[in-house]
Amino acid sequence: MSEHIPVQIVEVAEPSHKKKAASSDGHIYTRSFSGLYRNLRLGGAGFLFLLFFATAWLDWDGRQAVLWDLAESKFHIFGATFWPQDFILLSALLIICAFGLFAITVFAGRVWCGYTCPQSTWTWLFMWCEKVTEGDRNQRMKLAKAPWGPNKLARRAVKHSLWLAISVLTGLTFVGYFTPIRPLAEELFTLQAGGVSLFWILFFTGATYINAGWMREAVCMHMCPYARFQSVMFDKDTLAVAYDPRRGETRGPRKKEVDHHAKGLGDCIDCQMCVQVCPTGIDIRDGLQMECIGCAACIDACDSIMDKMNYPRGLIGYKSEHTLQGGRTHWLRPRLLGYVTVLVAMIGALVIALHERPMVSMDVIKDRGLFRENAQGQIENIYILKVINKTQQPQEYQLRLLDAEGFELHGKTRFSIPAGEMAELPVSVAMLADRPASSSLELDFELVDSDQPAIRSVARSRFVAPLNR
Ligand code: SF4
Ligand code: SF4
């Protein structure tokens, strides 16, 4: 049975590290750094930004490739169109993503937070803008303390302009997945946008600017629900960014050439680099903390110090609690295997469901009037058929009643519907028999594609007639 690692909230118990991480004005000024995990994050974030910003502008078959058309209640994704009836598949996809996140968290802690969460990736982008316009940590701290003058004003103005430009692009792109982006962008940049679209662009612009520019780690620490409950998913074999106190302590400064072990010192030279690069301003040497978003910046920073000191890397690294206690990490464990098995089964089921997705759907809505008598004196019921052609080509269909001896279908029984469109067809059914066995009978309508009989839909409705006519 796996055990949970209790998350240690150190903010109250050991507030001293906050003083080290933040400046006297309470702001966190992170130092720039380089290293393997930074490069991994840059690569991953670059790919995600490209995916987010570029996909909205792609076309497919003369239409925006990915568009959740709210007005038409359709979701286009490249060659496929999904209707509200298919949204069960979207729910399944969301459940799969949630399970994927659980599995990754059990395996490697908060990698989602550190590498791919939009809050973190946009914050890193905003921090890069800050570094470009105001300089590295010490320069920014100096600038913050400096009185307002042309230099400070110009740097701050450029920084906020960059932040705003990214925020507007983010807002426009996000809304552009729900309403066609090309006309939307034209309207926005010619100041003709209005109504609901403008409201949502401004909303997401503001949210991006505030969350990534001003709130940053506060969102992760105080607003994100995932940060709160993921600690229960950790077990003693979960890899998390951790400091190895058995190797690092006793910490303290020393000269490079000194035999520190002989002096009773561990490998931590207490340089504070791991604290100064931390975007949440914590000291990882205090242990696993809820504020840690698993970005691995402290690993890169500490590895560069270890290189300079000619010590082995990995004083801070991805470690499990078992490793930190001198044991070994168990890779194959029931909880992880359980998540992976469920995940694979759900992905398989989704693939089958997508493959078997009916390419035509039909709803039969019975007219509110119970029945009527037609010119031939037959009892007749009226129906409205809602037929959706889910293929990307126009299709011709044939309509008939299934096993309905004694009934006759009137109306258009052969019709075509353009690609990805819905049609409403009124039809009537007349009862040829004199007297029904019951006042309410079940009727099955069958719709078959004229060229591909495998594409078909059957819908059931009722036929109502008086018992004694
Ligand atoms: S970066 Fe490494 S050596 Fe420096 S204080 Fe942090 S843990 Fe110690
Ligand atoms: S402690 Fe390390 S991994 Fe955690 S947020 Fe700070 S820098 Fe990132």
Image (cartoon, rainbow, N blue to C red):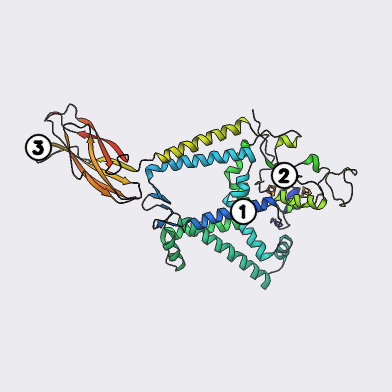
Along the line of sight, the residue nearer the viewer: 289 or 128 = 128
Whether residue 163 appears in this view of the structure is: yes
Tell me which residue sits at (36%, 52%) in the image.
Answer: 72
For disc 1, the marked residue is 43
Mark 1 lies on a secondary structure that is: helix
Other residues around mark 2 within 10 Å, as few (<14) / some (14–19) / many (≥20): some
For disc 3, the marked residue is 377
Tell me which residue sits at (22%, 45%) in the image.
Answer: 414
Q: Could you tell whether 239 is left or right of 410 in the image?
A: right
Other residues around mark 1 within 10 Å, as few (<14) / some (14–19) / many (≥20): few
Mark 1 and mark 3: Cα distance apart in space:
75 Å
- Pick out the residue farthest to the front: 451
Mark 2 lies on a secondary structure that is: strand
Tell me which residue sits at (70%, 45%) in the image.
Answer: 11
Along the line of sight, the residue nearer the viewer: 304 or 372 = 304
Whether residue 280 appears in this view of the structure is: no
Q: Which is more foreground, mark 1 or mark 3?
A: 1
User: Is tag 1's residue or tag 3's residue first in the polypeptide sequence?
Assistant: 1
Q: Amino acid at mark 1?
A: Gly
Dividing the picture into quarters, in which one does residue 450 lie? top left
Q: Could you tell whether 181 is left or right of 454 in the image?
A: right
Tell me which residue sits at (74%, 37%) in the image.
Answer: 324
Dividing the picture into quarters, in which one does residue 5 lie? top right
Q: Could you tell whether 356 is left or right of 445 in the image?
A: right
On-image quarter of the C terminus: top left
Find residue 317 and name its label: 2
Mark 3 lies on a secondary structure that is: loop
